[in-house]
């Protein structure tokens, strides 16, 4: 038996018991005649004591050899501590050690294995196994396990079947590039790693599985944006014989259950907002509704004067910043500087102070009188003491800029409280999205998403107008899930692919297997997938998904611990038919 107890288990009630413990040496305090050691494992820390009077000399000698992160096993007696530590559950006792076995020595770790560490990000990633010994990382992994367990229990008890789908497949388009795997046995041919199990889960519906889920790795070769991982985990789900309403209800139920079970938070019915409304009110399809500052469209109350900047703009939009009038001129200049940064890209910002005496003072007093500014306050909902911020320009751009400003100001005002949870459904997404660079339309969700009933005809005439049976679940300004009702008719799927620019041959080559399956009694079906990493990090009250992944990749997609990706040697390249044979 390696241990009778863990290092988090012993209390005053155990005093006088003989125990065996094992773990890592976190700290050694050597007073010469007396040595204290903090022994750590996953469960906590227990203090060990060795002293000249009560401990065998040879044991004391061995204890003096211990360094940080040595792995040891000890036997000893639980005794009451003289000076108690109320910060840890085992703080009232210590172990008077009688036997010490060094199970393994350790080099001095490159950073301190404590809650506050001196190790930088890169170093901690290189030695991730040491980082995992630290409470913040360890607790996040335990938290993640709790969430996945709760998801499994919830879905399983609702009749969902967990099915594994293959990783070595053909491309499933989710809008990113595929990671590919060369096939040794099929020279010059490649598998793609799934961007999601989309087509397989649809085939499971054709197969009659009816309610499927899987906690599954997905792979997307994207240019890495901050806090994106090339491999990430989805809670992937699909159901047959359902309508959009059924899906929203089931997964709203699951999310509500998680919030209750994991966070102890009760939330009511999730609000639903159309994509168009979300863009209009928040400039964003994943609005953070923990706070207000909704957009007000101000063309009518601004374009009647001689102010060219507003008159020439497609959209003039404003928000009321609560208490914002307390900002000094310098602070407002700072906000303006912030929105002019290239990442946000606004040309400037107009503002109007709502003074406590009911008067207004704007940065464009030359053009607008008190009556005008009173209208600005009214339309944005600004009260005395608030600040009205106004941006103008092309609709899409200005909405994006205002959305960034709204989030930034909320952050500065402390309105993005991680303990508050404000979920909502965003529904009625457009089916297609115009790629500004190529001028082509592509599927906003994916090509298997069905248009709203009766909108198929619009595809030919006004493709940008067609709405989809697609929905996202948004939590605190993050998309945590998204899905759609699917096309289950071969002809409609073929039409859809044609509109997306696939020739008949290309469509057949890439998705023939799915369209063929639709000819054998495909039931109506739909589903969604949650981004597990993101969901866990939000429930855990943190922003970075990397902190909830055991072995994450860095911002350049590298695993710096195992040093991947890395080159292959010539023999391997040849075997995979990847080596250019110059003699051929
Ligand atoms: N496969 C989709 C995705 O990865 C989710 C879905 O439509 O169910 O976003």
Image: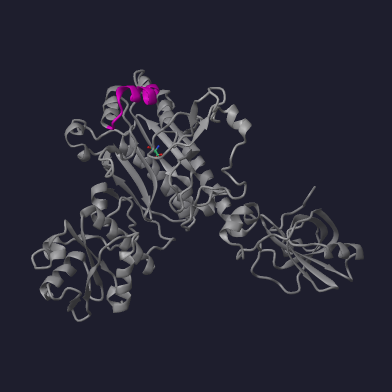
Q: Is residue 161 visible?
A: yes
Residue 128 in the image: x percent, y percent?
62, 53
Examine the structure image and report whether residue 112 is included in the region drawn in magenta.
no
Foreground residue, 305 or 345?
Answer: 345
- Residue at the limit of the structure toward the front, as seen here: 583
Residue 109 in the image: x percent, y percent?
70, 59
Residue 24 in the image: x percent, y percent?
73, 57
Magenta span covers which residues? Answer: 500-513
Query: For this view, does 75 lie left or right of residue 411?
Result: right
Foreground residue, 286 or 265?
Answer: 286
Tell me the quarter of the picture where residue 203 sits: top left
- Residue at the limit of the structure toward the right, as seen here: 57
Say which residue appears at 44% left-offset and 61% top-offset: 419
33 is higher (above) or lower (below) than 524: below
109 is higher (above) or lower (below) than 565: below
542 is higher (above) or lower (below) than 337: above
Query: For this view, does 342 lie left or right of residue 452?
Result: right
What type of secondary structure mainly makes up the magenta span? Answer: helix
Q: How is the image coloured?
A: one colour
Q: Is residue 167 visible?
A: no
448 is higher (above) or lower (below) than 123: above
- Residue at the limit of the structure toward the bottom, as seen here: 357
Q: Quadrant of ligand 1?
A: top left
């Amino acid at each position: 038996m390696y241990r009778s107890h863990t290092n988090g288990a012993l209390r005053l009630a155990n005093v006088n018991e003989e125990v065996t413990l094992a773990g890592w040496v976190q700290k050694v305090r050597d007073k010469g005649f007396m040595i204290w050691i903090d022994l750590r494992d996953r469960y906590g820390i227990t203090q060990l004591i060795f002293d000249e009077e009560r401990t065998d000399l040879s044991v004391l000698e061995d204890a003096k050899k211990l360094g940080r992160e040595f792995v040891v096993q000890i036997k000893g007696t639980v005794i009451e501590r003289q000076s108690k530590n109320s910060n840890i559950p085992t703080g009232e006792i210590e172990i008077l050690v009688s036997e010490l076995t060094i199970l393994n020595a350790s080099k001095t770790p490159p950073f301190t294995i404590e809650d506050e560490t001196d190790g930088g990000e890169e170093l901690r990633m290189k030695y991730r196994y040491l980082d995992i010994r630290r409470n913040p990382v360890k607790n996040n992994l335990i938290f993640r396990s709790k969430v996945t367990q709760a998801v499994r229990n919830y879905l399983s008890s609702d009749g969902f079947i967990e099915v594994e789908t293959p990783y070595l497949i053909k491309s499933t388009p989710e809008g990113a590039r595929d990671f590919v795997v060369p096939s040794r046995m099929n020279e010059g041919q490649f598998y793609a790693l799934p961007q999601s199990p989309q087509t397989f889960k649809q085939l499971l519906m054709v197969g009659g599985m009816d309610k499927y889920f899987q906690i599954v790795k997905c792979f997307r070769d994207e240019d890495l944006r901050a806090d994106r991982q090339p491999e990430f985990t989805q809670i992937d789900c699909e159901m047959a014989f359902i309508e959009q309403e059924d899906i929203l209800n089931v997964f709203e139920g699951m999310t509500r259950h998680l919030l209750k079970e994991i966070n102890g938070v009760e939330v009511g019915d999730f609000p639903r907002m159309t994509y168009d409304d979300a863009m209009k009110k928040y400039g964003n399809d994943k609005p953070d509704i923990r706070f207000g500052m909704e957009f007000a469209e101000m063309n009518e109350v601004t374009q009647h004067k001689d102010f060219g900047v507003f008159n020439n703009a497609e959209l003039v939009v404003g928000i009321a910043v609560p208490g914002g009038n307390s900002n000094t001129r310098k602070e407002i200049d700072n906000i303006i500087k912030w929105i002019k940064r290239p990442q946000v890209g606004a040309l400037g910002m107009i503002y109007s102070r709502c003074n406590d005496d009911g008067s207004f003072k704007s940065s464009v007093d030359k053009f607008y009188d008190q009556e005008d500014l009173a209208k600005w306050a009214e339309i944005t909902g600004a009260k005395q003491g608030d600040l009205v911020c106004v941006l103008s320009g092309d609709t899409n751009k200005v909405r994006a800029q205002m959305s960034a400003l709204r989030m930034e100001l909320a952050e500065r005002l402390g309105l993005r409280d991680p303990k508050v949870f404000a979920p909502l459904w965003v529904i009625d997404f457009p089916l297609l999205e115009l790629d500004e660079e190529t001028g082509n339309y592509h599927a906003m969700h994916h090509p298997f998403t069905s248009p709203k009933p009766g909108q198929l005809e619009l595809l030919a005439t006004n493709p940008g107008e067609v709405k989809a049976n697609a929905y996202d679940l948004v939590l605190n300004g993050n998309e945590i899930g998204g899905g759609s009702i699917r096309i289950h008719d071969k002809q409609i799927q073929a039409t859809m692919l044609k509109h997306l620019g696939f020739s008949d041959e290309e469509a057949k080559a890439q998705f023939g297997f799915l369209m063929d399956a639709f000819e054998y009694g495909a039931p109506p079906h739909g589903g969604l997938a949650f981004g597990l990493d993101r969901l866990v990090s939000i429930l855990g009250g943190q922003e970075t998904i990397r902190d909830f992944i055991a072995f994450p990749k860095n911002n350049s997609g590298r695993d710096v611990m195992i040093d991947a990706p890395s080159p292959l040697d010539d023999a391997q390249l040849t075997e995979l038919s990847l080596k250019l044979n110059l003699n051929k």
